[in-house]
Image: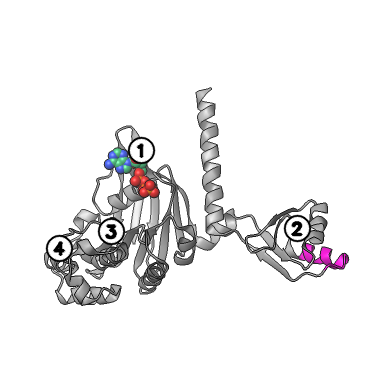
Amino acid sequence: MIEATELTKRYGERTAVDRLSFTVRPGRVTGFLGPNGAGKSTTMRLILGLDSASGGRVTVGGKAYRDLPVPLRAVGSLLDAKGVHGGRSAYHHLAGLAASNGIPRRRVDEVLDLVGLPAATARGRAKGFSLGMGQRLGIAAALIGDPEVLILDEPVNGLDTEGIRWIRELMKSLAAEGRTVFLSSHLMSEMELTADHLIVIGRGRLIADTTMRDFIETNSRAHTLVRSPEPDRLRALLESTGAQVRLDATGGWRVDGPDAATIGNLARDHGLAIHELTSMHSSLEEVYTALSQSSVEYRTENQKEAAR
Ligand SMILES: Nc1ncnc2c1ncn2[C@@H]1O[C@H](COP(=O)(O)OP(=O)(O)OP(=O)(O)O)[C@@H](O)[C@H]1O
């Protein structure tokens, strides 16, 4: 469990993290979202004791990071996949981490196996690693102490489809084992598939702390996907009722306004065949983009207001 209470970080005049309070619970994957510069990396660094807070506190398993007896056994992290010395082999990098944290060397083979890095590759210099291999090595390092808590900043950055799917399944299985998994990503479609819970911040402040489902349902505009063999007639009919009709990415009509039952009844009353009628929610990406835009517009308005 990670608990932040009124956590604040100022860099000179700039407040990167602003009285942020949240709890990241075990047994589920928690996604950390926010636009560029919102304070995600700073928050993660504060959790990991890499930076000191200007105010408030944050604990991992009830303790400040610096008070953890063997930090790697409590919390594993991946902040920068290129943080490995290129001249060392993956194996030696991991063996060094294990030795300095009192972790038996056999754990190195276990984590290499877990992340799918073959022994021969692991003995080679990390400098020759592809981005995907570097990412796997970073995750192996995060897992070496078999920690209860995992913190990963953009773990899928630059990975191919197979690598992304692998990370998704790994995160889910670690959470299913009862661990606390906290990760940031700019890839919304991936976040929607991976995370059960979301913490959303903007300009260092908490915007939402809720389940994925609730975040999407609360902020999405419900709409209906409808398909007919007579698409133009259907469109005209819908528009005559005041509905907003747009072409969906799949070639059907995306209708805002009337619900599925109303559309179905309308089509029946006009003898129009319907081949699909589906109630839809927005995707995380749509919801998040709309929310970010409205907060940008809100900010711009406020700034104009303040300038007057
Ligand atoms: N060491 C630092 N010194 C001064 N300002 C900093 C420092 N680190 C971060 N900041 C500022 O704090 C704010 C938050 O940055 P942070 O990197 O935490 O955001 P982020 O949400 O991780 O962004 P991104 O999605 O781009 O990685 C930014 O305005 C940034 O410029």
Name which of mark 4 and mark 2 comes first in the sequence.
Answer: 4
| Residue 96 percent across, percent down from the top left | 13, 65
Please provide the residue range marked out in magenta.
261-272
Q: Is any part of residue 16 visible from this angle?
A: no
Closer to the camera, 286 or 5? 286
Q: According to the image, label 1 marks what residue?
A: 15
Residue at image point 40% right, 70% down: 162
Q: What type is the residue that disc 4 sits on? A: Arg
Q: Could you give the CA–CA distance between mark 3 and mark 2, rounded to whole angstroms?
A: 48 Å
Which mark is on residue 88? Answer: 4
Give yes or no for contact between labels 4 and 2 (Cβ–Cβ under 8 Å).
no
Label 3, ligand 1: CB separation under 8 Å? no
Tell me which numbered mark, 1 or 3, is placed earlier along the sequence. 1
Crowd tier of the residue under label 2, counting other residues whose Cα lies within 10 Å: few below 14, some 14–19, many 20 or above: some
- Tag 2's secondary structure? loop
Q: Position of residue 14 (x, y in %)?
A: 34, 35
Q: Is residue 220 left or right of residue 51?
A: right
